[in-house]
Image (cartoon, helix red, strand yellow):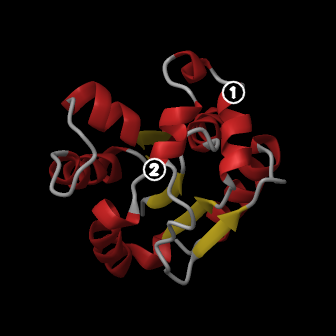
Amino acid sequence: MTKYIIIRGNSGSGKSTVAKLLREQLQESTIILGQDTLRREILGVKDRPENLTLKLLPDLITFGSKYFPVVIIEGIYSNQVYGPFFQQFLADHAKETLVYYYDLSLEETKKRHANRLKAQEFGDDLLKRWYLPKDYLNVPQEKMIDQKATAKELVPQIIQDLNNLRD
C-alpha cells in the first residue's frame, strides 16, 4: 500500500529541502510531486483556481501510487486553490497519509529564503506578497511545523510517523 506525505507551507519555509532529504533516506522508493516543478516548470501556469496543476496532480498521484511505496506532495498548495482537492484526497486516503504544515512567521520565512539559491530569483517583496499566514487544511492529521524544527530533526520524525502508519 502506498503511503502519502503532504508537506505544505509558504515559499522558502523548507518544504523542498525536507522532501529531498526524505527521498535520500527512503531512496528509490519515493517520488516527489513538487508544486513549483509541476506548476511553474512543467505547465507554466499561474497559481489560480482551476489551474492545470489541479488536473495533472491526481494523475501523477495515481502514477506514483502504482510505482512507488511513498508519494511526497510538496508545495505551497494554498487552501483557497487546492483545499477542496486535498479534502477529497484525505477523505479517500486518510489512513495512509501524513500531513505537515510549516506554520512560520513572515520574518522567519524571509530569513530562511535569504539562505537559499532562489533568493537570487525573487526578493522579500514577492515573498511578502505571496505569504499566506495560517493557511491550514484544518484536517485532524495536520501537524504543524514551527520555526524551531530543523530539516535534519524533522526528517527522522516524518520517517517514524511513516513507519507508524498501518499497512
Task: Please tell me whether mark 2 sits on a helix, a strand or a loop.
Answer: loop
- Relative to 37, residue 62 above or below: below
What is the three-letter code of the residue carrying label 1?
Ala
Which residue has dot 2 on it?
Answer: 76
Label 1 Cα crowd, 10 Å radius (few <14 / some 14-19 / many 20+): some
Of the 4 image quadrants, the one containing the N terminus is bottom left
- Relative to 109, residue 145 above or below: below
Q: Left or right? Give the position of 147 relative to 142.
A: right
- Residue 145 x/y as whole percent: 70, 60
Which residue has dot 1 on it?
Answer: 114
- Relative to 115, residue 103 above or below: below
Among the 4 quarters of the image, the one containing residue 113: top right
Residue 8, which numbered label? none
Q: Left or right? Give the position of 39 relative to 98.
A: left
What is the three-letter code of the residue carrying label 2?
Ile
Choose between 31 and 16: the one closer to the eye: 16
- Whether residue 16 is visible here, answered yes or no, is yes
Of mark 2 and mark 1, the one earlier in the sequence is: 2
- Residue 11 x/y as whole percent: 53, 42
Q: Left or right? Give the position of 61 relative to 155.
A: left
Numbered circles on residues, count = 2
- Whether residue 28 is visible here, answered yes or no, is no
